[in-house]
Amino acid sequence: MNIIETLAKAIQTILQDIGISDIEISFEHPDEMSHGDFSTNVAMRYAKQLGKNPQELAQEIVSKLGTLELVDKVEVAGPGFINFYLSKDYFKQELTSISEDSGKSNIYQGKKILVEHSSPNLFKAFHIGHVMNNTIGESIVRLANFSGASVTAVYYPSDVSLGIGKAIWSLLRKGEDMLDILDTREGKLGFLGKCYVDGTKIFEENSEIQSQVREITRKIYEKEEGREYSAYLKGKEINLEYFLEETKRLGSHFDAFIFESEAGDVGKKIVQDNIPKVFENSDGAVVYKGEDRGLHTRVFINNEGHPTYEAKDIGLFDIKFQRFNPDISILITDNQQTEYYKVVLSAASEIKVEWKEKTIHRTHGRMTFKGKKMSSRLGGVPLASDVLDLISQEAQKKIEDKEDIQRIEAIAIAALKFSILRATAGKNIDFDPETSLSFEGDSGPYLQYTYVRCNSILEKAKITGFEISKIPSEDWKPEALEKLLCRFSETVEQSIQLWEPHHIAGYLLDLAHEFNSWYGQTKILNDTNKNSGFNLYLVQSVMYILKNGLYCLGIEVVERM
C-alpha cells in the first residue's frame, strides 16, 4: 500500500464512522511545497451532508487521524483543505528506490492494449498533421509499455477511396510508366502527389470524366485485374514504403497494419447484416439514424453500394477485436473527428457493446507556425520531411559538431515532439522553432541538455574518484529536488490512467528547472561537502528519470550537445 492509499484509507474510516458512504477521496500536490506534500479537499466535499462548516469537518478529521506512519504533521488550511507533510524517512525510502526502471509499473500487467495511430491517406503526402498524430500515438504506445501491458501498435492506411480513384485517373493519363522512369523516391512521390492534385481539380471542373473516375474507383474496390488496378498497386507500394520510412525517422515502430479496403469489405457486410436492427435503408443508401439517439444521422453505405468511412470503421472494430482481442483499444485522431466518432461508436455499441466499452478515443489539435520565416518557407500544410529538415538546419547552428547528423536529427525531433506533447490533449499548437530549440528554455533540447549535464558530472566524478552513495548525512533534509524526484512514478501512472502524455512533459520541465537551479548552488564534487556522494546519487537519479521520461514521450537522449 503506497502513501496515498494509506492516507485515503485512514480518512475513509473516519468519514464512515461519522455517517458518510460512497466516499471519493482525491489528493493533489499543493502549488507551493511549503504548504505540504499532499492536500485533499475531502472536508469541503462532504461537509454539507453533515451540516458542518468545511473547516470544522477538516479539523475533526485531523484530530481523529492521530499519528500516521511516514507523516510528520497534518494541518488544516484555507476554507478546509487538509495538508500532509511527509517525513524524512518517507523521502529516503522513495529516493533509494529510484533506478534505471523508474516509472515502470504493473498497472495493466497481463492486459493487452492496442494503440491505433498515424493512419495515412495513401497517395497524399505525410504532412505535419500526421506528425502530431504520430507523436501522441507513439508516446501512448510507450506509456502502455511502461504499464506492464502487452502492446500492439497498429496503423490503418486509407488505400481505397474516390480520391485515390482521381489520382489513378490522372496517373494513367500522364503515363504510369513514369513511376519506373523516375529514379528517386522523392521524384516518384512528387509525381504521385501531383496526380492526386490534378485529378481532384479536373474531377471538380469536368463532369465528363467523373464517370471514368468512379469506374476506376469501382475496379480498385473490387480488385479487378487490369491496367487501373496494376497502376494502383504500384502507387500504393511506393506510398507505404514512404510512410514507414517517415515514421521510422520520427522513432515510431508498428506491429501490424489493417488496410481500409479490408475493413471496408468487412464493414459493409456487418452493416448489411444489421438492417434494420441498427441501420436502415434511405434513398438507395444505408444510414444510421443518429438523430434518434441525440446525435446526427450518417451514411454507412452510399447509393453506389460502397462502404463509407463510417462502415469501414465498423469493419475496423471487428478486425481489431477479432485479430488482437485487446482489453483496451486506444484510438488517436484529430479533434475535428470528435462528433464523427460519437456516431460511429454509438452504432458500434449496438452491434457489439465491447467495441465501445473497450475503446478510448484521444484527440489532438492543429499546428500553426510562429514567425514569417517558418511560415513562408513551409507554406500551406507543410510536409513532415520539410518541417524536420528546417528544424534540423536550425539545430545544426546550435551544436559544435555540425557533421553529427544523427545527433542533430535527435535534437530537432525532440524540439518538434516536445512542442506537441507539452500541450494539453486536444489543444492547438503554435510552433516556434526558436524557442522550441532553446537549450535554456522550456523545450525538448533543454531536457536533453540537462541529461547531458548530469552525465558529464557523473563522468567527471569517476575520473576524480568521487563515489555515489544512497545515504545522506544525519542532518539532511529533503528539499524541492528530492521531493520532485519522488513524484515521477506517480506522474507516469497519472499519464497512463488518463492516456495524456502532457503530464510527464510538464513534470520533466519542473524537474530540469529545479535540478539546474540546485546545480548552480551546490558544490557537488568537493571534498568538504559531506553529502557529495549523496548529491551524486541525486544527479544519477535525475539522469535516470529524464531518460525514462523522455522515452515515454518518444524522445531520445543524446550524450553531448
Image (spheres, helix red, strand yellow):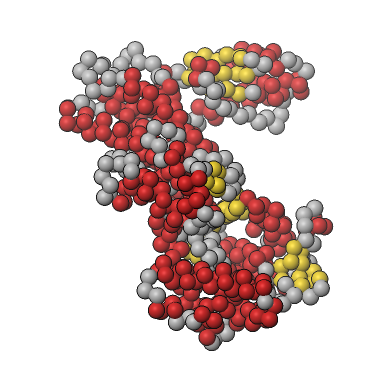
In this rendering, the answer to whether 318 lies above or below 555 is below
Q: Residue at x 60, y 53 (%)?
A: 334
Q: Which residue is drawn at 74% across and 66% down?
A: 299
In this rendering, the answer to whether 431 lies above or below 442 is below
* Number of marks: 0
Q: Which residue is drawn at 40% across and 75% down?
A: 182
Which residue of the protein is positioned furthest toward the bottom in this rendering?
Answer: 226
**Quarter of the C terminus within the rendering:** top left
In this rendering, the answer to whether 200 lies above or below 489 is below
Residue 457 in the image: state x and y as whole percent. 26, 30
User: Is 497 on the left-hand or right-hand side of 470?
Assistant: right
Whether residue 227 is visible here, answered yes or no, is yes
Residue 473 in the image: state x and y as whole percent. 30, 16
Q: Which residue is drawn at 64% across and 74% down?
A: 203
Residue 204 in the image: state x and y as whole percent. 67, 71
Q: Which residue occupies the foreground of this view, 106 or 189?
A: 189
Residue 409 in the image: state x and y as whole percent. 36, 50
User: Is 388 on the left-hand or right-hand side of 223?
Assistant: left
Q: Which residue occupies the foreground of this view, 462 or 239?
A: 239
Q: Which residue occupies the foreground of this view, 475 or 221?
A: 221
Whether residue 147 is visible here, answered yes or no, is no
The answer to which image quadrant residue 445 occupies is top left
In this rendering, the answer to whether 134 lies above or below 49 is below
Q: Which residue occupies the foreground of this view, 441 or 451?
A: 441
User: Is 395 on the left-hand or right-hand side of 323?
Assistant: left
The answer to which image quadrant residue 45 occupies is top right
